[in-house]
Image: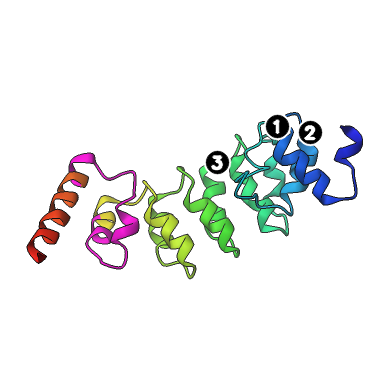
């Protein structure tokens, strides 16, 4: 195995990252630099059981946004790290911050105006959005579909939304 983890062919290392449960952490981290995962193995190597979690804060100032995204996986990361990455120049890093449960309500609201739609969509689903902002998103045709997936919406409110939608469909018939 050790020899295979140093193989010059990326496909060999990729196969190990996707299919080998005892793949070493350093190789998984190296593969993460260039591989996003496949349909058959989504989010590999990052969700591999041997993928490192500790020590990822060292990538806070890395030139690669892919590596900066890992900072929030470190158990030592803080809400201050989330706030910093929510202002990162790379959209993928901002999206990762928008998905973090430690995102501040103010940053969640600010990311609703991000230039990238997928960052805005992640912010719309943030349970950290203030209720009044979330209510506004639910009433806006452009954001309602994404906002209704926000986990902070109480179940009784979801029932009322569904009942209102069903009544609207019935009225059109």
Figure check: 23 above or below 83: above
Q: Nearer the viewer, residue 141 or 77?
A: 141
Q: CA distance from mark 1 to mark 3?
A: 23 Å
Badge 3 crowding class, 10 Å Cα cut-off, few under 14, some 14 to 19, many 20 or more, is: some
Residue 156 relative to residue 57: left or right: left
Q: Residue at x 49, y 68 (%)?
A: 116
Stretch in magenta: 135-157
Q: What residue is shown with label 1?
A: 50
Which quadrant is the C terminus positioned in?
A: bottom left
Mark 3 or mark 2, earlier in chain: 2
Q: Give the x, y percent position of residue 63.
A: 73, 59
Asked whether disc 2 touches disc 1, contact meaning CB atoms under 8 Å apart, the reply is: yes
Q: What residue is shown with label 2?
A: 24
Q: Give the x, y percent position of residue 19.
A: 71, 37
Q: What residue is shown with label 3?
A: 78
Q: CA distance from mark 2 to mark 1?
A: 7 Å
Q: Give the x, y percent position of residue 110.
A: 41, 62
Q: Nearer the viewer, residue 57 or 126?
A: 126
């Amino acid at each position: 195995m050790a020899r295979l983890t140093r193989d010059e062919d990326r496909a060999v290392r990729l196969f190990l990252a996707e299919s080998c449960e005892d793949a070493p952490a350093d190789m998984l981290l190296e593969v993460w630099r260039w591989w996003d995962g496949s349909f058959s193995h989504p989010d590999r190597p990052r969700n591999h059981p041997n993928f490192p979690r500790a020590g990822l804060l060292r990538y806070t100032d890395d030139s690669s946004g892919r590596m900066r995204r890992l900072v929030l996986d470190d158990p030592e990361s803080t809400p201050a790290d989330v706030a910093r990455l929510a202002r990162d120049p790379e959209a993928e890093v901002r999206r990762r911050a928008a998905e973090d449960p430690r995102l501040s309500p103010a940053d969640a609201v600010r990311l609703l105006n991000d230039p990238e739609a997928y960052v805005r969509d992640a912010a719309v689903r943030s349970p950290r959005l203030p209720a009044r902002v979330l209510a506004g998103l639910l009433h806006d045709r452009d954001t309602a579909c994404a906002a209704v997936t926000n986990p902070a919406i109480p179940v009784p409110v979801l029932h009322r939304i569904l009942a209102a939608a069903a009544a609207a469909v019935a009225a059109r018939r």
